[in-house]
Image: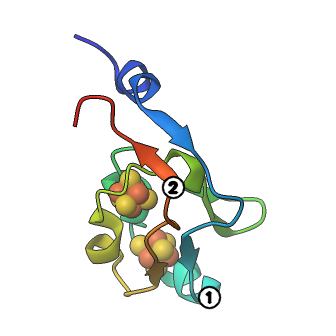
Amino acid sequence: MKSLEDKLFLNRYQPDKESHLKVINRDKCLECEGKPCTFICPAKVYSWNPKEKIIETAYEGCVECGTCRYGCAHDNIEWKNPRGGFGIMYKYG
Ligand code: SF4
Ligand code: SF4
């Protein structure tokens, strides 16, 4: 079976310069139990940075599944569709 990384490698990206994902209020993340965003995203876009105490978003890897919009425990993620021509381009749609 192929790993997730292998599968992601099959997808072609044209990352926009600006993130289409934004954590709205970082204070909410501090109190957020379990930080579901860090495990619900299939592309592992969200990760907790314990030093800076922030959620980091590796938005370039987003496969635009939309899960995080509903998965954030505090409705704290702003999600815009990447601008036309950017974001993911599926080879096998
Ligand atoms: S689930 Fe939402 S509130 Fe919780 S850590 Fe992630 S972005 Fe922050
Ligand atoms: S839309 Fe999907 S792939 Fe993109 S950050 Fe949200 S959960 Fe991850």
Q: Is residue 58 visible?
A: yes
Q: Position of residue 68 (x, y in %)?
A: 35, 67
Determine the residue located farthest toward the right in the rendered image: 52
- Compare marks 2 and 1 and give the one earlier in the sequence: 1
On whether ligand 2 comes within 8 Å of the CB at mark 2, the answer is no
Q: Is 68 above or below relative to 45?
A: below
- Where disc 1 sits, the SS reads helix
Closer to the camera, 11 or 21? 11
Residue indicated by mark 1: 27
Closer to the camera, 78 or 36? 78
Which residue does the image show at 38% across and 87% down from the upper left? 74
* Quadrant assignment, res 81: bottom left
| Few, some or many residues within 10 Å of mark 1 (<14, 14–19, 20+) | few
Q: Quadrant of the N terminus?
A: top left
Residue type of the residue flagged with mark 1: Asp
Residue indicated by mark 2: 85
Determine the residue located farthest toward the front in the rendered image: 85
Instruction: Using residue 23 as the reference point, say whether residue 73 is left or right of it.
Output: left
Which residue does the image show at 77% across and 59% down from the upper left? 51
The reply to whether the C-beta atoms of the residues labelled 2 and 1 are less than 8 Å apart is no
Q: Quadrant of the C terminus?
A: top left
Determine the residue located farthest toward the top in the rendered image: 1
Which residue does the image show at 62% across and 88% down from the upper left? 27
Closer to the camera, 59 or 80? 80
